[in-house]
Amino acid sequence: MILTNLPIGETAKVVSVKGNNAVTKRLMEMGVVPGVSVKVIKTAPFGDPIEIRLRGYSLAMRKSEAEAIEVSE
Amino acid sequence: MKTSVVENQASKRAKNSTEKSETRNPKTQIVIALAGNPNAGKTTLFNALTGLKQKVANYPGVTVERKEGVWKAGENAARLIDLPGLYSFDVTSMDEQIAHDVLTGKVANLPKPDAVIAVVDATNLERNLYLVTQILEYKIPVIVALTMVDLAEKQSLEIDTAKLSKLLQVPVISVKAAQKQGIEELSDAAFEAAHCERKLYLPWLSEAEFLETDDAIHLSLSEDAAANRKIFARYNFISDVYQESVKPVETTERGVSEKIDSVLTHKFFGLFILVAILLLVFQTIFSWAELPMSLLETGFGALGDFAKANLPEGILSDLISDGIIAGVGGVLVFLPQILLLFLFISILEDTGYMSRAAFLLDKLMSKFGLHGKAFLPLMSSFACAIPGIMAARTIENPRDRLATILIAPFMSCSARLPVYTLMIATFFAGQTVLGFISLGAVLMLAMYALGIVTAVVVAFILKRTLLKSPPPPFVMELPPYRLPNVRTIFQNMFERSWLFVKRAGTVILAISIILWALAYFPRTNVETFIPTDANASVEEIQKAKQDFQQSEQLRNSYAGKLGHAIEPIIKPLGFDWKIGIALISSFAAREVLVSTLSIIYNVGKDQNEESETLTQAIRDEKRADGTPVWTPLTALTLMVFFVLAMQCMSTIAIVRRETNSWAWTLFMVGYMTALAYLAALLTYQVGRLFLN
């Protein structure tokens, strides 16, 4: 499933990061690589961006960017 | 490919020694770079190592700050280079490019570092180690300085530094920079490493090559992503290192940061709190800056008078007091506001709130093609565009930063207030809308709104045309909330403000002199003066003569001639040549309009915007045919012009410095002036239709 479909408070493992552009590269540099577990913490007031937690820290990203991340529970 | 022989250190030493003769202190020729993620405690460590022996400048051609200090430890000394805070060395941003150039020895007057101290936040080990793996690939000796160890202990993270050191094959030293703990061990390790060669140990690179042939993992990564494969390999290595050197902790308890965040970035209250914080900041800036600003104003006034009194009368004395001191002083009075703004920005940044503000507002801002981080520069510009434009440095993407800079001057700054106030006091005082709302307040609000709406529209257009780029990525760390370090905050505040003084200083000085000369030459001498009031005292006649002399001088000066020259252009706006002079002189700074009008209308130089005489003089001013020059419509047109026109030489100077381009600066001046003219034309001509 896509990360944006993961409910708030749930944890899942990253399966893949799709695409090859600046955003996916930055996501991977920030530690979003296949195998890592991520937890969705919250969304911002207008429903976007979202905050996730991985490797012991918090990362914010837009939903459009999170769509590149496929996870499995 | 990375397993080639380490660069010959001996030849590098030799290269360094040839440069020794040029510097006073040959010992400082050892160069050590300090690298680390943002928020890893790099600045605190840099301060602890260099004390007060530091200097801040910019890297040539860019606005990336270059911080350098002298690090003395016992008999050893080194040039310590503080690299910008980074997540990666992959050369996608200006900061990363500079850091890469430093580590590869491509920066002028800066030899390739002999060692790199990698600052690693112990509470965020995995992501911080990512940068370390990249630094290790640079064939330079590396020492890991582990910071925030006490915080990690509080989170009951147990890090085995010996194990970590063994797995990475570089020294790992825990430091508590604020308490000066671990500094000695760090310097021993760093200076030893700087004199030694490092055996390259980069196991993840061979894994990356192996992965290229592994179809299973290849598929799980994106197609055709050789670089991404390397990132994956680095993180694989890090995960192994982490598992072996850190005792994992199972926590279900929410951290302090998460608790604070549940309030500050609350879905509903978050925005209210943000607005409240910003209101508080701006209210404080205005009220705290008031006294020092008026003191500075008085001070520069006194300095000008002093210069006039003590210099032999003539051009030089006039140039120094009316041109240089008045011009530069007029800009430096904004220093208190700028210091305070930077104080608050530093606090908001250092506590970690700034990222939350961007998080809260990104959706709103991205609708106009702007980054969430553009909010603060734009807010600041309501006080003054100069600090606002400087605050745009926090936006990493150059195009987004440029878009923000180009629209920041549309925010009605404090220098426009005297103009609005004068026009409202002259033509709209005491009038109401719907019987109870003051017309002045409505107009004032309308001017602010006009600026904001124009800014939004221009940003929207720019981001789809000239500055077209994919929406800026918003992948951003939300760092844990931390108590700010007092020293770092004040240091930040003074460094940034000093850049303002230095930068604005040079260009402003030049423009002040030019504008002064335009109004000063050619000289006019009033020989005959007939007092209009027969009963006036001698002093009053003297004063009236002086005022007359001043207005005649201005009328005949080059500025006056320019006013006449532009009259055909500004006539459709309802302005005559006298207003033309005021427009030209207010190019220096908007509030100059008030004093120029006072001079032209003969009412003495020290009038302020609420003065009865000036408002009366404006109302009484007649054309040759006896019709009044000024009508409420003229006043409204002038206000609209001032909302949109780029009339501030300090802003122009800062934009030139921050964009490093005259082309963009002139583009901004051009499009703003054109917009201002068109909007004023529309206001005047449509207004006339309605009134007739």
Image (cartoon, rainbow, N blue to C red):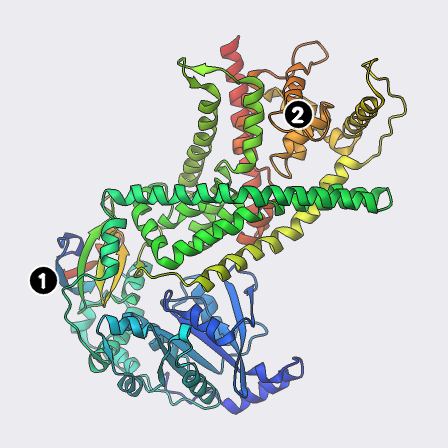
Residue B142: which numbered mark, if any? none
Q: Residue at the location (90% across, 25% down)?
A: B527
Up/down of B428 relative to B501, above or below = above
Residue for badge 2: B579
Subunit bearing disc 2: B
Q: Nearer the viewer, residue B376 or B677?
A: B376
Q: Position of residue B475 (x, y in %)?
A: 30, 57
User: On the rendered image, what quadrant is the N terminus of chain B found in?
Assistant: bottom left
| Label 1 element class | loop
Task: Left or right? Give the position of B199 relative to B480.
Answer: right
Query: Gap between marks 1 and 2, in whole Å?
Result: 71 Å
Q: Residue at the location (32% across, 54% down)?
A: B474
Tell us which disc is closer to us: 1 or 2.
2
Q: Nearer the viewer, residue B372 or B61?
A: B372
Q: Position of residue B288 (x, y in %)?
A: 50, 44
Given the image, on which type of amino acid does mark 1 rest?
Glu
- For label 1, count other residues whose C-alpha is less than 10 Å away and answer few (under 14), some (14-19) or many (20+): few
**Can residue B623 be seen in the rendering of this structure?**
yes
Given the image, on which type of amino acid does mark 2 rest?
Ile
Task: Left or right? Give the position of B519 relative to B446.
Answer: right
Subunit bearing disc 1: A
Q: Position of residue A18 (x, y in %)?
A: 22, 61
- For label 2, count other residues whose C-alpha is less than 10 Å away and answer few (under 14), some (14-19) or many (20+): many
| Label 2 element class | helix
Q: Position of residue B604 (x, y in %)?
A: 73, 27
Up/down of B557 relative to B6, above or below = above
Up/down of B391 relative to B275, above or below = below
Residue A73: which numbered mark, if any? 1
Q: For the residues tagged 1 and 2, is the chain the same?
A: no
Quarter of the view holding residue A2: bottom left
